[in-house]
Image (cartoon, rainbow, N blue to C red):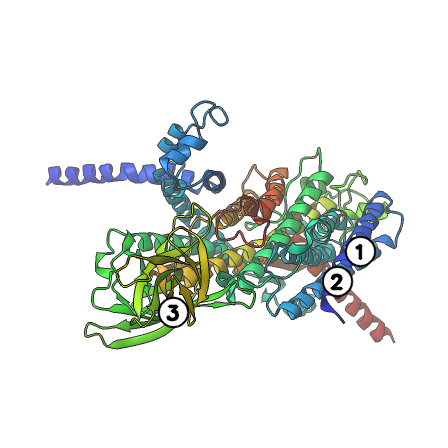
């Protein structure tokens, strides 16, 4: 029996040691405001490094731009840069560790500082001694004013007033004490939502010509728990993809007319998407992201409509051009190259020697190599970004609370005390943020009350 | 009337008005005896503010969408925001120092936009596809409003640093409420002073002394304070030895507190602007945060001002240190607003030279 209790007490000792360490060493350190400020500035400084050093480039790029000799600032070589992870700052273990530390600091601060401060603000006291007013900067003693007059004036200024024989306490702006707590809580919610998204979400991209159907297969960014979320039982048909151009010829908007098909190939949803207007289906969102020219439909002399795929040409940074080759003789012995820059319909026709021989618009025909080449249409393909992020509702909740919290944090918590004694009234007050406005308000109120009481005296004499 | 001519007239006009206003404020600070100058300066700021508002409205009518499509328009929107915030801050502090420091910045911005930007960058351009959204107005206008508010807050912090140079200062006003308590110098002492009941400062020339002294001195007229005598009226009535009377805010206190309040206004705006951008990005291309240089710098700005707000409530850091942090925020906001576009990288590099 005795051994049993001693075992338990040893166990509790074992448990108490880390608990005491947490309460006495770790928690005060985490809740230290100087640590919080340091963390805020550290995150800022490391974020700057990610905007100055190009992110996610090739090894050759860093070798060329950050040579070992002469090293930038005498130390920043490509080797050091890659070891520290400055080529992907925001995904390095130390940056994420900094964010987690920041989250812990936020939590610690909320419990050790903000909740006690809120409790103290709610548990107010009347002042019962005139000397208590002496410690307040904004305090005064008056002989012309009664407690009831002051009470009415404070109510008019939208204070909540508590009164008890000869003593008064008034406050407003308690929201200003709740706001910062809400800000901290919502930051934690946003961090949580971001973690959920990175673990359970996925991103994919599909390039599909007009008229064809695709399934989501080209997933390039998937969280470890996202496998079940990639849709298997539905596909998407691109009914049509087109671009609207402004009269000056620049792009106005990209459009994709999409249908969601179930396993039987039946349409279950249809929507035309454009940049800023995605399609949503079963937690998956499809965004207009990119485009290309997929093919051209032509007729040569009296041939049926032939479709030739077009490929993106390597222009070494000279703009995006697509090209294809079409025969002009049935035996394929001669032909021309067709080059297009956009979907407006104009094609440049080059012969086998690379000379520009003609231009042709969709719906028109031209004569090359003795054959009539009629272009029916250019077929565009649409680049669709597909994304599922189950963390979004959580992140949005955090965003909403954060906006509410920062706005509430602007409110200043103002308190006024008053005490009647020896035929005079002691009045004092303080506020936590808006000192200037509060001073104007309180002094203004006292002056206004003085004026009205003087008026009353004059009236009484008259 | 031709809208283009009107615009050309309005942008030069706002620059000229701001230039004159700046000179008025500077002369006013150098020669505080001229009584009419502060009112003239305020009027100048208001006129410039209206000129720029008219310019932006004319643009809106001409283009048919909210005029924030290029650098020229956003510069004028920023300058408009600075003049608007200036008017609020000046009304709160009633100090002519505010204009002496905000007017040159507003003037510089309009000068750059109206005179240095090449003509082809001043014409309004059709929006690129990615910007065709109602979120543009929500996100960009709130961001620019927050920049202008934070810039004015940072400028007031610089003014505070100038006013208090070489002095140890304790801050008043923070979320935990460190201010509001009496300074030991102004503790009530029950000694026999008969007629002068006011618990006043001994050295009326120092700027950190209550403003009562400054007013008596005929110097910088700041907040409210010519009313202090009326508080002491009952004292003379009752012939009491020592009266408890309020310890008023000094010019330094006022500048610091208004800087804090203006930054306190800009910080929620910045938060809302960043969130609007994040939600827009998520709606438009499915990612609410992509560490694009501009959004990273907006986050950096947010972090710097968050550090400022926390520094104010840290024991041992109060005084000039938070103000130095706020003043450095001035540079951070400019890097966020222009610096990132000079790099010409990322989603936000539209409406610039490249």
Q: Mark 3 lies on which chain?
A: A
Query: Residues under labels 2 and 1: Cα distance?
Result: 9 Å
Front: mark 2 or 3: 3
On screen, residue B48 versus residue A72, left or right, reads right
Q: Residue furthest front?
A: A370
The earlier-in-sequence mark between 2 and 1 is: 1
Q: Do the residues labelled 2 and 3 touch (CB within 8 Å)?
A: no
Have a look at marks 2 and 3 and say if they share a chain: no
Circle 3 crowding by C-alpha within 10 Å: few under 14, some 14–19, many from 20 = many
The image shows residue B223 at horizontal and vertical percentages of: 75, 53
Element at badge 3? strand
Whether labels 2 and 1 share one chain: yes
Q: Indicate the chain on which mark 2 is placed.
A: B
Secondary structure beneath label 1: helix
| Residue A174 left/right relative to A283 | right
Residue under numbered circle 1:
B17
Which residue is pictured at 24% across the width and 40% down the height? A15
Label drawn at residue A192: none
Instruction: Tell which of B28 and A146 is nearer to you.
Output: B28
Quarter residue A162 falls in: bottom right
Are dots 2 and 1 in contact, CB under 8 Å?
Answer: yes
Residue occupied by mark 3: A374
Other-residue count near label 2 (Cα within 10 Å), few / some / many at <14 / 14–19 / ≥20 = many
Q: Mark 2 points at which residue?
A: B51
Eyeballing the image, is A360 above or below B289? below
Q: Which chain carries label 1?
A: B
């Amino acid at each position: 029996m005795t051994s049993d209790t001693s075992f338990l007490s040893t166990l509790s000792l074992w448990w108490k040691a880390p608990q005491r360490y947490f309460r006495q060493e770790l928690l005060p350190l985490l809740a230290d405001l100087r640590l919080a400020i340091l963390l805020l500035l550290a995150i800022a400084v490391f974020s700057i490094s990610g905007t100055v050093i190009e992110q996610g480039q090739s090894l050759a790029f860093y070798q060329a731009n950050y040579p070992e000799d002469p090293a930038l600032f005498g130390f920043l070589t490509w080797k050091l840069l890659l070891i520290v992870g400055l080529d992907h700052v925001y995904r390095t273990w130390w940056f994420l560790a900094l964010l987690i530390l920041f989250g812990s600091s936020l939590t610690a601060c909320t419990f050790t500082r903000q909740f006690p401060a809120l409790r103290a603000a709610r548990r107010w006291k009347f002042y019962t001694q005139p000397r208590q007013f002496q410690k307040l900067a904004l305090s005064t003693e008056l002989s012309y004013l009664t407690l009831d007059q002051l009470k009415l004036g404070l109510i008019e200024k939208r204070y909540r007033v508590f009164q008890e024989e000869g003593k008064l306490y008034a406050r407003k702006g308690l929201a200003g004490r709740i706001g910062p707590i809400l800000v901290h809580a919502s930051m934690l919610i946003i961090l949580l939502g971001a973690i959920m998204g990175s673990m359970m979400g996925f991103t994919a991209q599909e390039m599909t010509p007009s008229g064809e159907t695709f399934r989501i297969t080209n997933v390039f960014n998937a969280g470890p728990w996202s496998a079940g979320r990639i849709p298997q039982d539905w596909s998407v048909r691109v009914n049509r993809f087109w671009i609207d151009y402004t009269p000056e010829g620049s792009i106005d908007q990209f459009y994709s007319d999409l249908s969601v098909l179930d396993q039987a190939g039946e349409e279950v949803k249809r929507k035309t998407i454009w940049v800023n207007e995605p399609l949503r289906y079963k937690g998956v969102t499809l965004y207009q992201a990119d485009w290309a020219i997929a093919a051209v439909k032509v007729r040569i002399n009296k041939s049926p409509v032939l479709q030739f795929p077009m490929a993106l040409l390597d222009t070494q940074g000279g703009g995006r051009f697509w090209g294809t080759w079409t025969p002009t003789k049935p035996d394929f012995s001669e032909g021309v190259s067709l080059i297009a820059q956009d979907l407006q319909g104009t094609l440049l026709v080059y012969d086998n020697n690379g000379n520009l021989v003609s231009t042709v618009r969709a719906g028109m025909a031209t004569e090359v190599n003795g054959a009539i080449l009629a272009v029916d249409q250019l077929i565009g393909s649409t680049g669709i970004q597909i994304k599922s992020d189950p963390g979004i509702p959580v992140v949005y909740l955090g965003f909403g609370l954060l906006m509410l919290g920062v706005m509430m944090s602007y409110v200043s918590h103002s308190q006024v005390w008053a005490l009647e004694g020896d035929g005079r009234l002691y009045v004092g007050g303080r506020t936590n943020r808006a000192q200037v406005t509060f001073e104007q308000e309180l002094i203004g109120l006292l002056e206004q009350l003085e004026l009205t009481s003087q008026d009353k005296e004059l009236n009484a004499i008259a | 009337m031709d809208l283009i001519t009107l615009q050309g007239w309005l942008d030069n006009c706002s620059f000229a008005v701001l230039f004159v206003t700046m000179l008025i404020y500077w002369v006013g600070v150098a020669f505080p005896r001229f009584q009419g100058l502060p009112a003239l300066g305020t009027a100048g700021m208001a006129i410039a503010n209206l000129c720029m508002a008219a310019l932006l409205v004319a643009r809106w009518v001409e283009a048919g969408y909210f005029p924030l499509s290029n650098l020229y328009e956003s510069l004028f929107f920023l300058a408009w925001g600075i003049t608007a915030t200036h008017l609020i801050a000046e009304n709160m502090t009633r100090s002519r120092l505010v204009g002496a420091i905000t007017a040159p910045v507003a003037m510089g911005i309009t000068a750059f936009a109206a005179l240095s930007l090449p003509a082809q960058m001043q014409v309004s351009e059709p929006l690129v596809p990615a910007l065709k959204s109602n979120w543009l107005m929500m996100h960009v206008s709130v961001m620019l409003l927050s920049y202008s508010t934070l810039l004015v807050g940072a400028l007031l912090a610089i003014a505070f640093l100038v006013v208090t140079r070489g002095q140890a200062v304790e801050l008043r006003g923070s979320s935990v409420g460190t201010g509001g308590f009496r300074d030991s110098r102004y503790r009530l002492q029950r000694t026999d002073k008969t007629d002068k009941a006011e618990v006043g400062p001994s050295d009326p020339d120092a700027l950190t002394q209550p403003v009562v002294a400054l007013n008596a001195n005929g110097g910088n007229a700041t907040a409210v304070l010519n009313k202090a005598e009326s508080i002491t009226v009952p004292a003379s009535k009752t012939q009491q030895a020592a009266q408890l009377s309020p310890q008023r805010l000094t010019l330094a206190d006022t500048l610091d507190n208004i800087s804090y309040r203006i930054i306190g206004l800009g910080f929620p705006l910045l938060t809302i602007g960043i969130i609007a951008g994040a939600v827009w990005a998520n709606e438009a291309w499915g990612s609410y945060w992509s560490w694009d240089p501009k959004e990273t710098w907006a986050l950096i700005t947010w972090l710097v001002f968050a550090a400022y707000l926390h520094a104010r409530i840290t024991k041992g850091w109060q005084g000039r240190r938070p103000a130095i942090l706020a003043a450095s925020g001035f540079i951070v906001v400019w890097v966020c607003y222009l610096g990132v576009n000079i790099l010409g990288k990322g989603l936000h590099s539209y409406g610039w030279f490249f």
